[in-house]
């Protein structure tokens, strides 16, 4: 598929449209100096009380989790909701995926998971038990206790599932840390397969628990050793959609080489770029750290490569062989709407010129 056609198709997938649907619900946003305003916040948060403070910004939407300071570390909170059709048609995998996605969110912030809770609605006891078995098995595999929840069984309900997680971090990997001239890396486990008729790339089946736990522990290790600045797990928006969420908070641009992205043989780009993998992350780091980051992932059997570099343009450009095309321009179009560029600029100015 020609690059322009490929990128245009990816912009209009249901998952990408669902992310863009968040922006109209953002309570306040504006354009300033061709940059999205730092006053952008969600109606589903109270973080707009003082976005001039770093710790308040870490609690705002945009990262994979909210992070709140407590006694010299950060407490992390995240929540995932599963599509009702997914819960109804793939009950066990929906339960597993809800836990897996939350654990990836905690890891993407440089954290370690502490506990999981859930809320489930269903019309069928047998299928509800399958959902719960998926949750319990995933919690066991990743070494995170399931500590409670809320269950609703009645014929009047539509199958639905929400799972929340708590964690801690010593050092954060935040999208707020993205700056120009950082290298963008991707880490993907290629040893997997697609769940039938979905974009879910499963690389956890028949894998020992200790290996799953060791792989996910790489992210907090990278944070605590100051190798990585920012991270984002690859979610249902796919590789390029997740990249936009990595960049949008700072209104950053990037140049991406499609050919540098690891991909299994025989999988078309049009499908691979839409993946929701059980292990997949985008990272930013300084050039001199990339070689050791890649080596750490390779030792765990994870493919990792530098796929691009950030810049201050607000434009995301993609290159494939001799073709180059614009994928997104934050100067003219919101994605989720969670951007704090002005707030970050104000903080930098206040540090340079204290009152």
Image: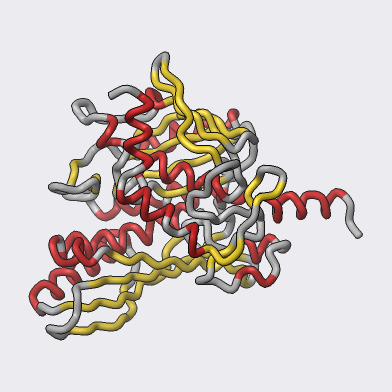
Query: Image point 61% across, 58% down: which residue?
Result: 29
Q: Residue 303 occupies which quadrant of the picture?
A: top left
The answer to whether residue 82 of the structure is visible from this angle is yes
How far from the left and from the top, in percent, is residue 219?
46, 49
Q: Residue 136 occupies which quadrant of the picture?
A: bottom left
Give the image's coloring scheme: secondary structure
Query: Image point 14% across, 47% down: which residue?
Result: 197
Q: Residue furthest left?
A: 126
Q: Quadrant of the C terminus?
A: bottom right
The answer to whether residue 59 of the structure is visible from this angle is no
Left or right position of 325 against 349: left
How far from the left and from the top, in percent, is residue 268?
23, 29
How far from the left and from the top, in percent, is residue 23?
49, 57
Left or right position of 296 against 148: right
Query: Image point 28% across, 24% down: which residue?
Result: 1
How far from the left and from the top, in percent, is residue 94?
22, 62
Left or right position of 141 against 218: left
Q: Nearer the viewer, residue 190 or 293?
A: 190
Taking 269 as reference, is 19 above or below it? below
Left or right position of 161 against 339: left
Query: Image point 65% across, 50% down: which residue?
Result: 31
């Amino acid at each position: 598929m020609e690059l322009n056609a490929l990128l245009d198709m990816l912009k209009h997938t249901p998952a990408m449209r669902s992310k863009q649907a968040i922006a109209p619900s953002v309570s306040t946003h504006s354009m300033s100096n061709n940059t999205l305003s730092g006053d952008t916040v969600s109606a589903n948060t109270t973080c707009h009380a003082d976005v001039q403070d770093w710790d308040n910004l870490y609690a705002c939407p945009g990262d994979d989790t909210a992070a709140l300071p407590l006694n010299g570390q950060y407490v992390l909170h995240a929540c995932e909701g599963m599509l009702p059709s997914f819960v109804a048609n793939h009950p066990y995998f929906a339960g597993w995926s809800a836990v897996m996605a939350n654990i990836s969110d905690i890891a993407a912030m440089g954290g370690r998971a502490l506990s999981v809770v859930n809320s489930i609605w269903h019309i069928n006891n047998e299928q509800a038990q399958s959902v719960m078995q998926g949750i319990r098995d995933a919690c066991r595999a990743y070494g995170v206790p399931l500590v409670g929840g809320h269950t609703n069984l009645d014929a009047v309900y539509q199958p639905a599932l929400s799972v929340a997680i708590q964690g801690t971090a010593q050092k954060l990997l935040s999208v707020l840390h993205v700056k120009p001239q950082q290298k963008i890396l991707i880490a993907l486990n290629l040893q997997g397969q697609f769940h039938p008729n979905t974009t879910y790339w499963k690389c956890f089946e028949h894998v020992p628990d200790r290996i799953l736990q060791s792989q996910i522990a790489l992210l907090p290790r990278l944070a605590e050793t100051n190798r990585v600045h920012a991270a984002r797990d690859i979610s249902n928006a796919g590789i390029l959609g997740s990249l936009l969420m990595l960049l949008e908070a700072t209104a950053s641009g990037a140049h991406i080489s499609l050919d540098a992205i690891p991909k299994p043989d025989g999988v078309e780009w049009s499908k691979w770029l839409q993946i929701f993998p059980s292990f997949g992350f985008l990272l930013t780091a300084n050039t001199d750290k990339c070689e050791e980051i890649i080596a750490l992932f390779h030792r765990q059997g994870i493919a990792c490569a530098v796929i691009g570099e950030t810049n201050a343009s607000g434009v995301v450009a993609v290159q494939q062989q001799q073709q180059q095309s614009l994928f997104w321009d934050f100067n003219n179009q919101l994605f989720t709407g969670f951007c704090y560029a002005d707030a970050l600029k104000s903080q930098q100015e206040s540090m340079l010129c204290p009152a």
